[in-house]
Amino acid sequence: MRALSRLPLLLLLATTLTWAGGDDDDDDEAQDVAPARMKMEMDFSPIEVSAPAMPAPPSGSFSARVGGAGDIEELYLSLRQGFLPHPDVLRAEGLFGMHDLPARKTGPCQVTLCLLGEVSAAPPPALAGAQALVMLGFDTNLPLDGWTRPPMHVAVVVDADPALVQHSGGALVGALLALQANLGPEDRLSLVSAGREAEVTARALVGDDQSGLVSAARRTPVNAEGAVSQAVEAAGRLLQEATDPGALKRVLVLSGGAPHRLGAAPETLYAQATRLAESGVGVTAITLGDGLNNEGLARLAGAKGGAYTRAPSLEGVTRALGEDFETLFVPLVYRFGLEVSPASGWRLSGVFGVPEAALTWDSAGVARLRVETLFVSRKRGAIYLTFSPEGVSGMPPAPLREGSALAELRLSYQELDGEWRVDTRRLAPEPAERESHGLTDGRALIQWLVTMREGLARYHAGDVDGAYAALRDLGWGPAEAARFPRELGAWQEAVTLTMPR
């Protein structure tokens, strides 16, 4: 295996938008989280769950995450098992969701959501033809220190699939305990079984009633036939009838995602979630296990107020419910929209960090991003854009100059109370020394993402030698290798699996 290739020193031309933001705290690092241990005895096996305790809040403000939480744990699980997964498991929004990516701030954010922006003249080397990299980050007016979410009533739809329970060793009930670790005395938790018929197993368990939860979970019938859609409907009615005014209302679906257990087509599930959102009930879905077609639950949670993530193991569920609790359950704004209009001589050539379905283009080259819900996040979320010069036939492209316009942005979103906000801003480069850690890290992560995708795609097309050739030169230097050890290890495993024998 070749040693890591080194990136040459580049003089970066960076920028930021002079938009409202929180205090400068770019160097905030994720704090170590001490696990809170919980045990329970189950009929089929004992299980121990480590639910991360909430860290002491740092100074600064919350950020926002696009489309709920997500990760790429399936890649790491596959590599540990000695095989290369399909490139579809490598989603930019999933990769970015596993990291804190702070953009540079210029002051406190005075409204619910503020967009931060930077421009660099040094895009990732793997993106041939791109001459500018833009980072768009998020800030909010919610302080990390002292802010508390409203009380919450969560109705958990338990897909009591015997195959899932057998495969995961009780993961469904373990996930309930991990969820309960994040709830307090003012919160309520109900269980709804998605067996042959929707059945309310337990109502209004308080956050600290662990014995009641264990007893109720044991009464959840394991069933060979599923009806997730019907159970979601029952959970929605329960929340509307039994929830105090002002409380957040969420349906949480825990399922293996098997299509025959959903009880409805993906489009029907989407319409169901949209209707529930209009009545004030959001839907969060977590699929357990791997290798299944999860289109149905992904659609259900892609509606307004929806969140979706996949967890190939119980540990992944515990991590999601611990580290990303707000990002799965606490919406910030609805119907986030962003229009990107490139300046003359430039075109938008790449978007990283939003689902592909959220992006549309028009004939004039204007890109429109639409995300139904942005969620509150302790990690700083980001979207990255790349621009390429249009050029004139026979003439070299115009260079990216400090202060020259690169694009115009139009931001819009709907507050939770229904009010709309709109703002427009201009993207232009600023001096290189202002580049934030988020832009530097984003550049490295995109380089890794594009390299790994290309290698996996060639491998699954049957071109093993081509996969090795695509993977072997990652283009990272020592700084990137030290900053992202898990991604580095995954790349090394992929190279080993494609190396000529």
Image: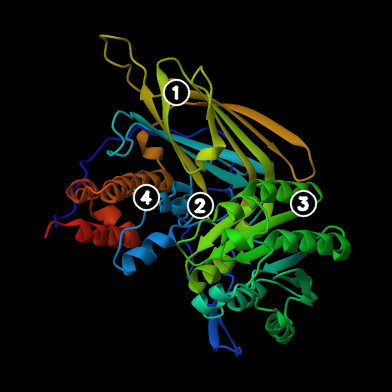
What is the C-alpha distance between the residues marked 4 and 1? Answer: 31 Å
As drawn, the label of residue 34 is none
- Residue 6 at what x, y percent from top left? 19, 47
Residue topped by disc 4: 87
Graded by Cα atoms within 10 Å as few (under 14), some (14 to 19) or many (20 or more), the crowding at tag 4 reads: some
Graded by Cα atoms within 10 Å as few (under 14), some (14 to 19) or many (20 or more), the crowding at tag 3 reads: many
| Direction from residue 309 to residue 391 in the image, left or right | left
Mark 2 or mark 3, earlier in chain: 2
Q: Write the residue at 65% across / 71% down.
A: 182
As drawn, the label of residue 406 is 1
- Residue 466 at what x, y percent from top left? 20, 46
Kindly indicate the quadrant of the structure image that contains residue 257: bottom right
* Nearer-the-camera pick, 214 or 412: 214
**Can you say whether 72 is above or below 403 in the image?**
below
**Can you say whether 335 is above or below 452 in the image?**
above
**Can you say whether 21 is above or below 285 in the image?**
above
> Which structural element holds mark 1?
loop
Mark 2 or mark 1, earlier in chain: 2
Residue topped by disc 3: 276
* Nearer-the-camera pick, 107 or 81: 81
Mark 3 or mark 4, earlier in chain: 4
Mark 3 belongs to which amino acid? Leu
What is the C-alpha distance between the residues marked 4 and 2? Answer: 35 Å
What is the C-alpha distance between the residues marked 1 and 3? Answer: 41 Å
Graded by Cα atoms within 10 Å as few (under 14), some (14 to 19) or many (20 or more), the crowding at tag 2 reads: some
